[in-house]
Image: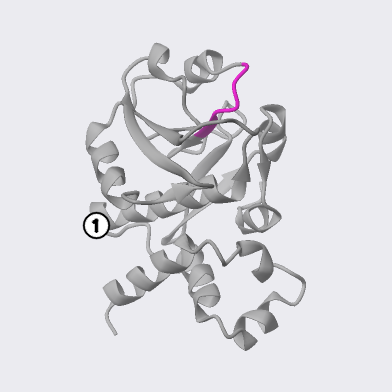
């Protein structure tokens, strides 16, 4: 079967409300994967570890979008009464438009996902998550300062852990991975699923 078939299957697995990444990271995770009746769990691991980060732009953004969606699913925000889960993309409207296609009809804990393009610090809030692609004119320190006192997750394409990012993407070999600043997450009132933390690169 071709790569697009598996990409669709992997997306379905990562979008499932019934499959949590936590179940594949126990001390016997390898055995659990191969004995599982849910091959989507195995495909999820392959998705996170093996899909090339050097793929064509649209595929690369689909991979980023899949990660962002799962960050939203497996990180707990403070309870609120909202119908929308807002994700802001710093400056790059073309990425926002691509993510809109990826997130169409998706929900996070019953909330519809709304994408918006952010052009200045004053537009950062309200947002549950802010994604900062490379080549953004806004710097991480100004973004962090503008979001002080909020529970907005900051995700960056460049590795800016320790400089203000809560999660950063990392290209490891030919794969796209991510790293998490768990202390920074806790500091803004967010809690990550243990399976998600186990999947992250430890620094």
Q: Position of residue 110 (x, y in %)?
A: 50, 46
Q: Is residue 193 above or below residue 78?
A: below
**Who's the residue at 33% across and 69% down the image?**
8
Q: Which image quadrant for residue 20?
A: bottom right
Q: Which residue in the structure is indicated by mark 1? A: 56
Where are the magenta residues, as a range?
A: 149-154
Dominant SS type (magenta): loop
Query: Badge 1: how crowded within 10 Å, few (<14), some, or many (20+)?
Result: few
Q: Nearer the viewer, residue 81 or 159?
A: 81
Does residue 108 appear in the picture of this structure?
A: yes
28 left or right, relative to 161: right
Q: Nearer the viewer, residue 79 or 152?
A: 79
Q: Is residue 74 above or below residue 159?
A: below
28 left or right, relative to 58: right
Figure quadrant of the N terminus: bottom left
Does residue 134 appear in the picture of this structure?
A: no
Magenta span has 152? yes
168 left or right, relative to 189: left
106 left or right, relative to 117: right
């Amino acid at each position: 079967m071709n790569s697009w078939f598996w990409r669709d299957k992997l997306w379905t697995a990562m979008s499932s409300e019934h499959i949590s990444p936590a179940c594949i990271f126990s001390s016997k995770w390898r055995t659990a994967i191969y004995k599982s009746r849910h091959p989507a769990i195995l495909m999820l691991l392959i998705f996170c570890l093996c899909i090339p980060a050097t793929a064509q732009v649209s595929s690369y953004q689909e991979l980023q979008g899949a990660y962002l969606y799962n960050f939203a699913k497996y990180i707990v925000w403070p309870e609120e009464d909202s119908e929308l889960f807002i994700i802001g993309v710093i400056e790059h409207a073309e990425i926002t438009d691509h993510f809109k296609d990826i997130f169409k009809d998706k929900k996070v804990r019953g909330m519809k996902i709304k994408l918006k393009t952010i052009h200045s610090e004053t537009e950062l809030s309200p947002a549950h998550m802010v994604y900062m692609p490379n080549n953004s004119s806004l710097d991480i320190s100004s973004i962090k300062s503008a979001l002080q006192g909020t529970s907005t997750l900051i995700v960056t394409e460049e590795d800016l852990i320790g400089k203000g990012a809560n999660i950063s993407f990392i290209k490891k070999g030919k794969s796209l991975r991510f790293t998490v600043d768990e202390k920074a997450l806790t500091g803004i009132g967010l809690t990550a699923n243990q399976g998600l933390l186990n999947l992250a690169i430890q620094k």
